[in-house]
Image: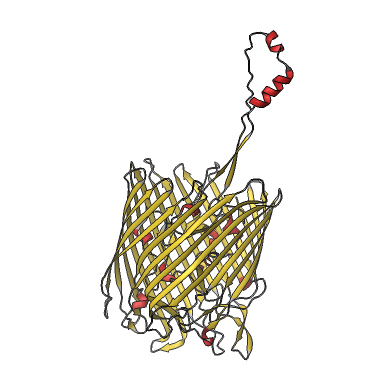
Amino acid sequence: MRRSKNAFVSVNYIFFTFPAIIWLGTFTSVQSFAQIDSTKADSINKVNQLKEVQIRKIKISKRQTSSTPLQILSGAELEKLNSLSVADAVRFFSGVQLKDYGGIGGLKTINVRSMGTNHTAVFYDGVQLGNAQNGQVDLGKFSLDNIEEIELYNGQKSSIFQSAKGFASASSLYLNSKQPDFSDGRTQKVRASIKGGSFGLINPSLLWQSKISNNVYSSLSTEYKNANGKYKFRSTNGVYDTTAVRKDGDIETMRLELGLNGMLADSSKWKVKLYGYKDNQGLPGAVVNNVFAFSQRMWNKNFFIQSSYEKNVGKYSLLATAKYANDNLRYLDPDRVTVNGLLENNFQLQEVYISLANKLKITNYWDVVLSTDYQRNVLNADLYRFAYPVRNTILTALATQFRFARFDIQANLLNTLKYDKTVSGPADINRNELTPTVMLSWQPFNQKEFRVRSFYKSIFRMPTFNDLYYTYYGFTVLKPEYTKQYDLGFTYIKGYDNRILSQFSIQADAYYNNVKNKIVAVPGNNQARWSMMNLGLVEIKGIDVNIQSAWQLTEYVNLTTGLTYTYQKAIDADKTSASYKDLIPYTPIHSGSFLASAAYKNLSMNYSFIYIGERYNQSTNNVYNYVQPWYTHDLALHYNTKLNRSEVRLTAEVNNLLNQDYEVITNFPMPGRYYRIGLTYNY
């Protein structure tokens, strides 16, 4: 992969040449000048002429200065990955387990450091994508077509000037959409692309950016995706092998985004985004007892409008955010017949969210922030004796930061107030919790290339509506999760002059997480029904390593590589549990990835490898619950060319190159070898 300003620290070489020739003597006459011996003059010139001085300047990015572990994929890096959605891309982050339930239409959720999906907050352009119903954000719904950058923070974002929501999760995934840039003098930019390939995939998209005025810009992004989702897979019970075809993973989606952003006369900034998404998809079920076909279907309609306003007045800064979201889910199960006909459930989840963040710059090195968020969630359904829950949440965060030349300390205290109401049945009790966080970053030497970081974070997570007010069984007694996180790590970056290896960077972190009353979601026979349970105590110990390098092999050939590795033991630490000291479900001890990209003029080739070690699909670790390791190889070729003022990009991909049979989740088989081709046109 080519270097980008966020993924690799650029090394800029600035040459200062001082051609100073100092002549000694007083030129009072031509005769005295002529009497100077030419040999002596030459020697004087050599002594007094300053030599060329070469100064190397290293630019340190936020990856190195962040007080919490930060991983970034952006720009050209995202384009080179064999990735169709955000879910495909986050697989390459260390410490991440992507739970994939099979195929292009299968549910895809992220689990960071075995904390669980609900402990990872997903933000889209700075505002959290909430789902109070089940806490599951399906990353497969978010295409990379309009994504400029993906950031993953362990702990929280290393900036105290943010909404209270930013402090309220164990990890944060930030999706940043492409923003208009007209610094080249243009007023219109259009990018059209189309992808196709295996599973009957057809995926056209369009991005249109426009400069309305000197201070107002617009962005329109739309995308359509259709795939039959069919692929062959191997099923075995240990005695008999069967080759079958997955037929229930079809999907049809439509996405439309409209963004406006600008600047007012007082230099304050504002943004507005409208987002609409709808799909019609099959639900791949668990392949057990020779049942290979499933008839359940799901329809989603998601809409939200969000806006933000940022203003600076002297030493005071204000960040205001507002959002309204309306999500509709229709579920149909033709295999279940009720007195009213086929089983059909309809859910509507509405959310209102308001946030105010206030920052005061007390001194040049001391900032204080007070953030307050209010969120209201309402869930309706056409179910008999449904609880109709309403949740009001108030988050207040008081944060401070001290910045010195070589030392940075941040601390915050988050207060969570939660009130649930129901129309029928009991409601969960009111909650009021305080959770602190402390983060440190230290540069121990004069060189900025090496930094040490550490953080402690205590966090509180409420069960979701589905956790508490389960569809079939009514109110479920579940305890909230209380989590403590500890992390110690370092970052190092080095640039080299006139060498094949031009730059090298590494970041490594050791961590320990303690989760009390961990809520575990175990899927049933399909993705729409889950069973919930508390694990009394879970301990998670691990090490994350991320290494990146850039090589200039020849004048025209450059190579970039990235290596991630995670060692992790997430065990049931409850001494009263039958699975005491056993690994919790789907947590491998060893996992990692490798990326390599070679570029020659207009042609580039990219290779990626992912490995997930052995694990267990149940709390009890025995031979019956053992899940084998899996790995995949992916390969892609890209060709870029210019046609007049336009750019054309051709892409060909081969995924799962060795046709590996594997399952991320037991009984949900993944596709074998599959292909994609793409064409992108930029005007």
Q: Position of residue 570 (x, y in %)?
A: 46, 74
Front residue of 139/630: it is: 630
Location of residue 627 by image quarter: bottom right
Asked if residue 122 can be seen in this view, the reply is no
Residue at left offset 33%, top offset 81%: 476
Front residue of 112/407: it is: 407
**Circle count:** 0
Q: Is residue 230 above or below residue 303?
A: below
Residue at left offset 72%, top offset 16%: 37
Location of residue 425 by image quarter: bottom left
Q: Position of residue 164 (x, y in %)?
A: 34, 59
Q: Position of residue 588 (x, y in %)?
A: 52, 75
Residue at left offset 50%, top offset 48%: 448
Q: Position of residue 606 (x, y in %)?
A: 65, 61
The way the protein has been coloured in the rendering is: secondary structure
Position of residue 102 in the picture relative to residue 24 (left or right):
left
Quarter of the image containing the N terminus? bottom right
Location of residue 581 by image quarter: bottom left
Position of residue 486 in the picture relative to residue 182 (left or right):
left
Asked if residue 330 can be seen in this view, the reply is yes
Front residue of 24/245: it is: 24
